[in-house]
Amino acid sequence: MPKKTTSVHIPHPSSLKTWLFLAPLKFTGLLILLFGLGLVLSMALFGHGEPTAWKGHVMMTLFIAIYVFCIYKCIRFAPGDKLDRKSFVGLNIAQGVLSVVMLGLAAAVAVYLGVTPGIIPTTSSLIMSGIALVLLLFAGGVGILFFVSIYYRARMQEVSKSKLLLSLPFGFELFWYSGFLLEDARKPAPVLQTKSKILNSLSGWIVKNRTNTLIALGVMVVLYAMMMTSKIWYAIGFIVLSIIVASILLLRKGMRERLNHGFANFAVALNIGIIVAILSLAIFAPKTTQHKIVDQITITDTITQ
């Protein structure tokens, strides 16, 4: 009898094209399709008769559910490989450049439509508005995958799934610093394959030594701070916080081995603390609006009398 052979699954390296184009395109297409179907369904069910509050709540719930589902699918569209440091750095650079390009093109279309009202035919205006919307949705998909890349990089560094989930949303980005700055315990072959010699050389230069890493970190943090806010003190605060986090990761010994303990616990505690603070402000903050309305009514009555 012939011997039975067993097949061995050999994992294929992740493709940069999947992270940057295929997954965001699937997210964009799925979101447009489901939103269109949701709009048609809403018009069929609620298009007749007077608009009511409960109809608005149902439609809002439907569209929020569609958006959450599309985010979940975008996460599933991403390759499920744990990211080594060089792959993570190269992917982040490519994601940043692509996001800036997409947002810049969308802004250019919006500005062009704004400065030429009534000149462009209605059909062309609608087409250009649709293009701008697609570019924004695509950039949103790239942004979602940026957070997915942080997750898979942290998993490569042996941070537990539970602590990563418990750090969402406010403590999660701390793991970007650890993923960018800390070397892998072993030197794995890059998971992410790219044909771009420029990107491959740049990511290799960044991870080559600590000096290069700090230069790249400084440039990225400053650029992000400039894009994030126009207020100089907010930007300075973000840069200072980044320096503090980077110093803790690089100067304390054994951070790579203890990443799942002290650092991850701090990220979880920070997230819970911010959530509790926000809820406390929402619940216990003084309701000044009602007082202002009462004061205005009192003043009006006095003047009338």
Image: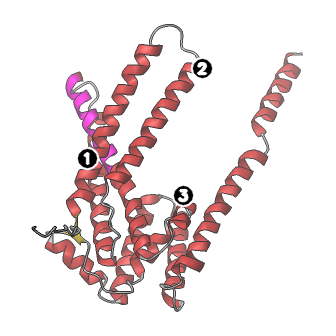
Q: Is residue 30 above or below residue 264?
A: above
The x and y percentages for residue 200 are: 20, 75
Mark pair 3, 2: CA separation: 31 Å
| Amino acid type, residue under disc 2 in the picture | Ala
Q: Which residues are magenta?
A: 123-140
> Which of pointers 3 and 2 lies earlier in the amino acid sequence?
2
Horizontal relation, residue 65 to residue 86: left or right: right
Horizontally, residue 104 falls left or right of residue 268, namely left
Which residue is denoted by mark 2 in the rendering? 53
Residue holding disc 3: 169
Give the distance between the C-alpha atoms of the residues marked 2 and 1, in whole angstroms. 35 Å
Residue nearer the viewer, 237 or 78? 78
The single residue placed furthest to the top in the displayed view is: 49
Residue type at mark 3 is Pro
Q: Are marks 1 and 3 in contact (CB under 8 Å)?
A: no
Kindly identify the residue that appears in the image at 31 percent across and 86 percent down.
187
Which residue is the extreme one toward the front? 1
Q: Which residue is mark 1?
A: 25
Magenta: main secondary structure: helix
Disc 1 crowd, CA 10 A, few/some/many (<14, 14-19, 20+): many
**Helix, strand or loop status at disc 3:** loop
Q: SS class of the residue under badge 1?
A: helix
| Disc on the earlier residue, 2 or 1 | 1
- Per the model, the C-alpha gap separating discs 1 and 3 is 24 Å
Q: Earlier in the sequence, mark 1 or mark 3?
A: 1
Q: Position of residue 56 (x, y in %)?
A: 54, 23
